[in-house]
Amino acid sequence: MENIMNTNTPDEAVKNVSKYYPAVYFLCAGLGSLAIGSALKMFGQNQMGSVISKFTMPLIAVGLYKTLKNISPTENTDQTNQKEEQIEKE
């Protein structure tokens, strides 16, 4: 398993984390932060609710990006070409 914490730059750490976790985790975390932030605001903890709600859009954006990236036609054709090359080698 790849070590996701010991990296040289923060960009590498973000790339490793986004590769390691599936898109569903990011989408659920985004929706969860929205629900928790809304509940905190409803119970009078406006400042903490605002802080937690700020994570909603970035998490959902990463989840949607990963979902759309997996169904992009260019990536699928690259995978198909690699499979064809492997079959030819065997």
Image (spheres, rainbow, N blue to C red):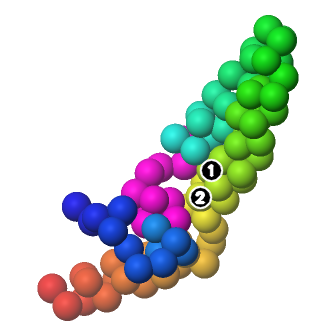
Label 1 SS: helix
Mark linked to residue 47: none
User: Main SS of the magenta segment?
Assistant: helix
Tag 1 residue: 63
Give the amino acid at mark 1.
Gly
Q: Is residue 15 visible?
A: no
Q: Residue 71 vs residue 9: left or right?
A: right
- Above or below, 15 against 40 in this view is below
The 10 Å Cα crowd at callout 1, few under 14, some 14 to 19, many 20 or more, is many
- Observer-nearest residue: 76 or 56? 56
Q: Residue 33 vs residue 29: left or right?
A: right
Q: Residue 56 vs residue 63: left or right?
A: right
Q: How many marks?
A: 2
Q: Residue furthest toward the top?
A: 43
Give the amino acid at mark 2.
Lys
Tags 2 and 1 touching, CB below 8 Å: yes
Tag 2 residue: 66
How far from the left and from the top, in percent, is residue 40?
75, 17
Quadrant in the rendering for residue 42: top right
Which quarter of the rendered picture does the C terminus lie within? bottom left
Residue visible at 25% across and 82% down in the picture: 87
Distance of label 2 from label 1 (alpha carbons): 5 Å
The 10 Å Cα crowd at callout 2, few under 14, some 14 to 19, many 20 or more, is some
Q: Residue 11 vs residue 5: left or right?
A: right
Magenta stretch containing residue 1, yes or no?
no
Q: Residue furthest toward the left?
A: 90
- Above or below, 37 against 58 in this view is above
Residue visible at 77% across and 26% down in the picture: 49
Q: Is residue 12 visible?
A: yes
- Observer-nearest residue: 61 or 5? 5
Chain part drawn in magenta: 14-24
